[in-house]
């Protein structure tokens, strides 16, 4: 398979996964799917990550995201056991 096709598929997968995270976090519903609002929120995150609080923010968000993924996995696992 050609290299550009592989890269295109990888990029498409990445975009789908990122979009899924936006939905999973509830941002689509909370913003009524307003793209301008979502983009503004993302730009606010960019500003924060370019500032002095970058490391603290990344650490906090990573821990919170891991806990949310783990809680979801545990919830799905317990539902399978019933």
Image (spheres, helix red, strand yellow):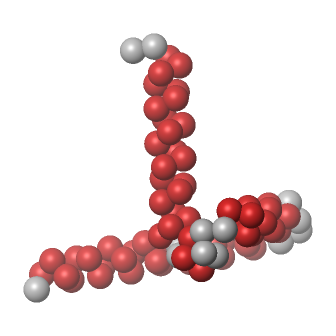
Task: Look at the picture and state if 7 lies above or below 26.
Answer: above
Indicate left or right for 51 with 10 as reference.
right
Residue 45 % position (x, y): 76, 66
Q: Quick one: 10 or 60, which is closer to the camera?
A: 10
Counting from the top left corner in percent of width and height, residue 25 is at: 53, 73
Residue at the right extreme of this rendering: 52
> Where does the image place residue 63, in percent across and percent down from the top left?
57, 74
Give the residue drawn at x 29%, y 82%: 75
Residue 4 in the image: above or below residue 65: above
Q: How many marks?
A: 0
Quarter in which the C terminus is drawn: bottom left
Name, please, the residue furthest toward the left: 82
Q: Answer with the quarter of the image where residue 78 lies.
A: bottom left
**Which residue is rendered at x = 86% and y = 60% of the image?**
50
Query: Residue reaching furthest top?
Result: 2
User: Can residue 54 be seen from the camera position used here?
Assistant: no
Residue 81 vs residue 45: left or right?
Answer: left
Residue 38 sits in which quadrant? Answer: bottom right
Q: Is residue 54 left or right of residue 78?
A: right
Residue at the outermost bottom position: 82
Q: Is residue 68 left or right of residue 81?
A: right
Can I make out residue 41 in this image? yes
Residue 13, position in %: x, y?
46, 42
Question: Quadrant where the N terminus lies?
Answer: top left
Q: Residue at x 55, y 65 (%)?
A: 22
Residue that appears at 54% across and 76% down: 29
């Amino acid at each position: 398979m050609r290299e550009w096709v592989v890269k295109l598929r990888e990029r498409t997968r990445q975009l789908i996964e990122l979009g899924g995270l936006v939905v999973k976090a509830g941002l689509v519903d909370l913003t009524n799917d307003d793209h301008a609002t979502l983009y503004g929120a993302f730009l606010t995150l960019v500003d924060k990550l370019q500032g002095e609080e970058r490391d603290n923010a990344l650490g906090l968000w990573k821990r919170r995201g891991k806990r949310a993924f783990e809680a979801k996995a545990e919830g799905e696992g317990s539902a399978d056991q019933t």
